[in-house]
Image (spheres, rainbow, N blue to C red):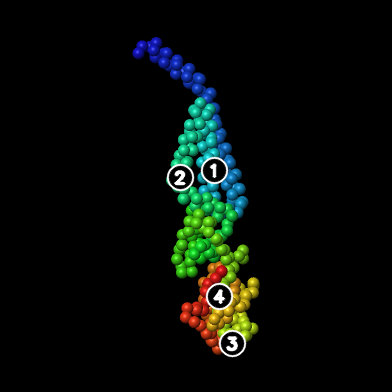
């Protein structure tokens, strides 16, 4: 290659650089300004999330999705200024997203359900809930799973898609209280007023029960051997287990003290947990 060829190549390269320089400068500016704006927008969104009632678990997840979407949009705009055909990139991203979505179809359903749970909050950490056959205290609400601690001190991990598709019973109120539902059996020979008085005296000895709202004591059903009474006092959610056993023990002692003898058949229990 002689000097003339080198000069021709250099001149061609220089002309190409001059021709592309406006596009390169424009794309660089769009990329720089765009990413700077994305940072500002994310700060505004973060501040808005901090002022909102959104759960802490969902904020990083939403921010990462918004951040990724905005940055991809800026990169596509910059590539378009350079003359790159962005429609093929968009189609490729859509194809990749579809493939990933099909591969993670079940997980994405749980993620979507988790977002709904974290936004609308049908339950929160500390609540006593019943989902299907499981009941217990909520110890964690994550994007994919809800974790319960049962009354047997076992940890149950429930996929959010399963949780939101089932009936959810939340037994905790806004004041952090929960109602016990205990069944005891009264002999047909006794009067309800007498037994109710004995039960209320027993409830007054239980330090973990709340006096407001007042406990409900009433006749539930009529069994073949006894009258089934419903005892429904309130306690704090965190005191549920100790209050339950405290109440059943106090009622049992009171019945023994007042010589309340209950006829029973095989299989009848003193009480059962309810919500």
Task: Tell me which label, 4 or 3, sits earlier in the chain.
Answer: 4
Judge whether 89 appears above or below 19 on screen.
Answer: below
Judge whether 119 appears above or below 205 on screen.
Answer: above
Report which residue position mark 4 lands on: 182
Report which residue position mark 2 lands on: 102
Report which residue position mark 3 lands on: 189
Question: Which mark, residue 66?
Answer: 1
Task: Tell me which label, 3 or 1, sits earlier in the chain.
Answer: 1
* In this view, the mark in front (1 or 4): 4
* In this view, the mark in front (4 or 2): 2
* In this view, the mark in front (1 or 2): 2
Return the residue found at the far bottom.
259
Task: Tell me which label, 4 or 2, sits earlier in the chain.
Answer: 2
Question: Separation of disc 1 and disc 2 at Cα?
Answer: 22 Å
Callout 3 crowding tier (Cα within 10 Å): few <14, some 14–19, many ≥20 = few
In the image, residue 199 lies at what x, y percent? 59, 81
Seen at 53% across and 56% down, the residue is: 165
Task: Tell me which label, 1 or 4, sits earlier in the chain.
Answer: 1
User: From where the camera sits, is residue 250 visible?
Assistant: no
Label 2's element? Answer: helix
Label 1's element? Answer: helix
* In this view, the mark in front (4 or 3): 3
Question: Separation of disc 2 and disc 3 at Cα?
Answer: 67 Å
Label 3's element? Answer: loop
* In this view, the mark in front (2 or 3): 3
Q: Quadrant of the C terminus?
A: bottom right
């Amino acid at each position: 290659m002689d000097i003339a060829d080198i000069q021709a190549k250099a001149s061609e390269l220089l002309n190409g650089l001059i021709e592309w320089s406006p596009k390169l400068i424009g794309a660089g500016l769009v990329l720089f300004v765009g990413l700077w704006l994305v940072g500002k927008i994310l700060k505004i969104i973060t501040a808005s999330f901090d002022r909102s009632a959104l759960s802490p678990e969902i904020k990083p997840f939403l921010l990462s999705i918004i951040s990724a979407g905005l940055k991809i949009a800026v990169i596509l705009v910059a590539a378009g200024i350079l003359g790159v055909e962005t429609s093929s990139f968009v189609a490729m991203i859509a194809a990749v997203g579809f493939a990933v979505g099909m591969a993670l179809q079940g997980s994405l359903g749980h993620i979507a359900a988790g977002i709904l749970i974290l936004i609308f909050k049908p339950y929160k950490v500390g609540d006593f809930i019943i989902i299907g056959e499981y009941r217990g205290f909520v110890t964690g609400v994550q994007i994919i799973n809800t974790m319960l601690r049962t009354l047997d001190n076992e940890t149950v991990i429930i996929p959010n898609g399963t949780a939101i598709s089932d009936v959810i019973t939340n037994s905790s109120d806004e004041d952090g209280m929960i109602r016990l539902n205990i069944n005891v059996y009264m002999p047909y020979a006794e009067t309800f007023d007498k037994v109710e008085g004995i039960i209320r005296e027993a409830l007054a000895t239980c330090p973990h029960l709340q006096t407001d709202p007042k406990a409900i004591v009433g006749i539930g059903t009529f069994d073949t051997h006894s009258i089934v009474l419903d005892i429904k006092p309130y306690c704090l959610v965190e005191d549920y287990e100790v209050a339950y056993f405290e109440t059943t023990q106090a009622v049992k002692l009171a019945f023994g003290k007042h010589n309340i003898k209950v006829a029973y058949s095989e299989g009848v229990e003193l009480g059962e947990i309810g919500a």
